[in-house]
Amino acid sequence: MNVDVILESERVRREIRAGRLTGTSRGLAPSFVQCNLAILPRDHAFDFMLYCQRNQRACPVLEVCDPGDPVPHRLAPMADLRTDCARYSVFVDGVRQGDRTDIKDLWRDDLVAFLIGSGITFDDALDRAGVQTDRHRWVLRTDRPTERAGPFGGNLVVTMRWLTPEQAIIATQVTARFPFNHGAPIHIGDPAGIGVDLGHPMFGGPVSPMPEGLAAVFWACGVTPQSAAEAAKLPLFITHAAAHSFITDLPAHKLMLP
């Protein structure tokens, strides 16, 4: 008798869709690629795609759905982008509305969904290499401008992790093998070197004093295109809520360089 095999990624999405999983996507289906989600009207989709192409380190696009189609046929053909993130953030004219657990009632035939590689993808590889991923982690804005496209622009957003010098070396080696999930760090050391203000993190809570023996390591972050779309004040823009990424059926090792 043939028995259908359900991927762990698909099982997790079913649990999310049913409302039984509501928290962060970190640690869920760890061997599968996770993506940042950006949904916007077709009239702005070309400029957004151009923005991502011009800023690939922060915005590595893995799939773009056809207008009105909520199914990512290449990355997760059994999924529904309207229900399969545990939490969504919705912006109207650049103003954040209340978060939602599904966006079916907001869906329109002109909406285009972008799936952008997320650094959560390489957490499993870092853990297996002995680099901690569950603490000392923030999302911050730099003073480095991105390259504009139409209404989309603004400064680069980064993920900062505090690691030991030994872990920083290993993390650089490991994440360099994931170019479609932001790749290697863009900076190690003094946050002022890339214009980061530790007093105003975007996510992760207040930045406490760094423990002795650790170093600040910075990766380009998929919040960059979300921040650009928010600042463009589109009539409607939808994204996954922070750390509630979309889980694909693509094994992470398929995107790794040898």
Image: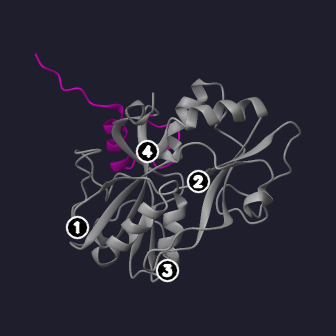
Mark 3 Cα shell of 10 Å, populated few (<14), some (14-19), many (≥20)? some
Q: Which amino acid does label 1 sit on?
A: Pro
Question: Which quadrant of the rendered structure holds the C terminus?
Answer: top left
Residue 241 coordinates in the image, percent (x, y): 50, 59
Q: Which amino acid does label 4 sit on?
A: Gln
| Mark sitting earlier along the chain (1/3) | 1
Q: Distance between the residues labelled 2 and 4?
A: 16 Å
Residue 239 coordinates in the image, percent (x, y): 43, 63
Question: Which quadrant of the rendered structure holds the N terminus?
Answer: top left
| Mark sitting earlier along the chain (1/2) | 1
Residue to which mark 4 is pinned: 34
Q: Which amino acid does label 2 sit on?
A: Ala
Mark 2 Cα shell of 10 Å, populated few (<14), some (14-19), many (≥20)? many
Residue to which mark 2 is pinned: 220
| Label 4–label 3 contact, CB within 8 A | no
| Mark sitting earlier along the chain (4/1) | 4
Q: Which mark is residue 67?
A: 1
Numbered range of the magenta stretch: 1-29
Q: How far apart are marks 4 and 1 (CA)?
A: 22 Å
Residue to which mark 3 is pinned: 94
Q: Is residue 243 above or below residue 179?
A: below
Q: Is residue 149 above or below residue 102?
A: below
Give the residue at the far left of this rendering. Answer: 1
Considering the numbered disc 4 on the image, is that residue within a helix, a strand or a loop? strand
| Mark sitting earlier along the chain (3/2) | 3
Considering the numbered disc 2 on the image, is that residue within a helix, a strand or a loop? strand
Frontmost of labels 1 and 3 is 1
Residue 150 coordinates in the image, percent (x, y): 42, 79
Q: Distance between the residues labelled 1 and 2?
A: 28 Å
Can residue 120 be seen here?
Answer: yes
Q: In this view, does 7 lie to the left or right of 228?
A: left
